[in-house]
Image (cartoon, helix red, strand yellow):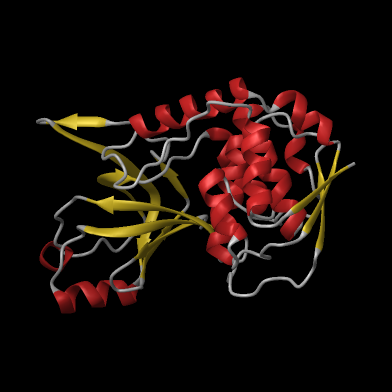
């Protein structure tokens, strides 16, 4: 099985399935109600969850995580999904065999084909070299960064900061918004590492708990590449992408910060780093 469904309330695994269709975020409408729809292929319920539902007499209306599993059946990433369906399995009975099961609800994030391809590689092994993302185009790098954020927040405990005072950022391929954060994450936490996915989260990471905290020295190789490409236009492209993403949600997030993109992106990144005491050495 490649996926599991994890229940937030009971902290139990609801079940496992071989494939999930519908994570791309297509919006459906039924009597003026908007929703997403996922289909779990060859789904099987876990006995412990079935016993919980029978005991609590609850419906399937609940918040869950759709978990990506590695080849050892460990979660390596997850996507939150709020199930709308009021299905009472303690009344109608749980299916005994593998089946395709469908749920209506709302996704907090979406998965495109490139991201699925990345997850399928990471089921075998996470990245072992830096810059594995460099061969991807801009949408592919966005997908990589989403997977990096998801994977690291799912699998790591962010409670210790490195005592290192010097880090090395390979800026050879930093030619767009996402690629900076791919490179920055690997500079701090190694291949596939996470250290923010936008300016607010970068600032949050610099406060500690994500591998290191300022002040530290960041030696930035090929700094001139970022100076050339991380301009106001590249920042504006990312803002527009975020707007399109928000438009695919059933409900707009309660807290949504839109970056202004009113100057070269490189200036905002350097300012954010230096504000917390990071010394940048261009190489």
Q: Position of residue 261 (x, y in %)?
A: 53, 28
15 shown above or below 54:
above
Q: Quadrant of the C terminus?
A: top right
Residue placed at 68% from the left, 62% from the top? 214
Give the vertical position of 254 relative to 25 (above or below): below
Residue in the image at 68% along x and 34% along y: 266
Q: In the image shown, does 107 or 54 lie closer to the viewer?
A: 107
Horizontally, residue 141 falls left or right of residue 219, namely: left
Give the percent coordinates (x, y) of residue 242: 45, 32
Residue 140: image quadrant is: top right
| Extreme residue toward the top, this view | 233
For residue 47, side relative to residue 133 (left or right): left
Q: Position of residue 117 (x, y in %)?
A: 61, 40
Residue furthest right in the image? 283
Relative placement, left or right, of 204 versus 194 is left
Residue drawn 62% across and 58% down?
206
Residue 75 visible at all: no
Horizontal side of 175 relative to 241 (left or right) equals right
**Along the line of sight, the residue nearer the viewer: 209 or 91:** 209
């Amino acid at each position: 099985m490649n996926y599991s469904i994890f229940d937030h309330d009971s902290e139990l695994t609801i079940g496992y399935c071989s494939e999930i269709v519908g994570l791309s975020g297509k919006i459906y409408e039924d009597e003026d109600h908007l929703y997403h729809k996922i289909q779990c292929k060859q789904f099987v319920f876990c006995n412990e969850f079935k016993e919980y539902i029978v005991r609590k007499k609850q419906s399937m209306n609940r918040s869950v995580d759709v978990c990506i599993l590695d080849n050892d059946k460990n979660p390596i990433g997850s996507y939150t999904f709020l199930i709308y369906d009021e299905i009472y399995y303690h009344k109608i009975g749980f299916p005994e065999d593998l089946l395709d099961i469908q749920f209506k609800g709302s996704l907090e994030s979406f998965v495109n084909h490139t991201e699925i391809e990345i997850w399928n590689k990471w089921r075998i092994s996470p990245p072992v070299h830096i810059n594995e993302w460099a061969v991807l185009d801009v949408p592919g790098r966005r997908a990589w960064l989403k997977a990096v954020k998801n994977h690291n927040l799912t699998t790591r405990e962010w409670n210790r900061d490195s005592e290192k005072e010097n880090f090395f950022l390979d800026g050879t391929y930093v030619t767009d918004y996402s690629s900076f954060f791919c490179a920055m994450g690997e500079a701090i936490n190694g291949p596939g590492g996470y250290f923010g996915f936008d300016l607010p989260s970068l600032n949050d990471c610099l406060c500690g708990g994500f591998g290191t905290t300022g002040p530290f020295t960041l030696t930035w190789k090929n700094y001139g590449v970022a100076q050339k490409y991380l301009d106001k236009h590249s920042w504006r492209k990312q803002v527009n992408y975020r707007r399109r993403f928000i438009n695919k949600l059933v409900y707009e997030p309660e807290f949504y910060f839109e970056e202004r993109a009113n100057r070269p992106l490189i200036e905002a990144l350097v300012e954010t780093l230096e504000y917390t005491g990071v010394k940048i050495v261009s190489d």
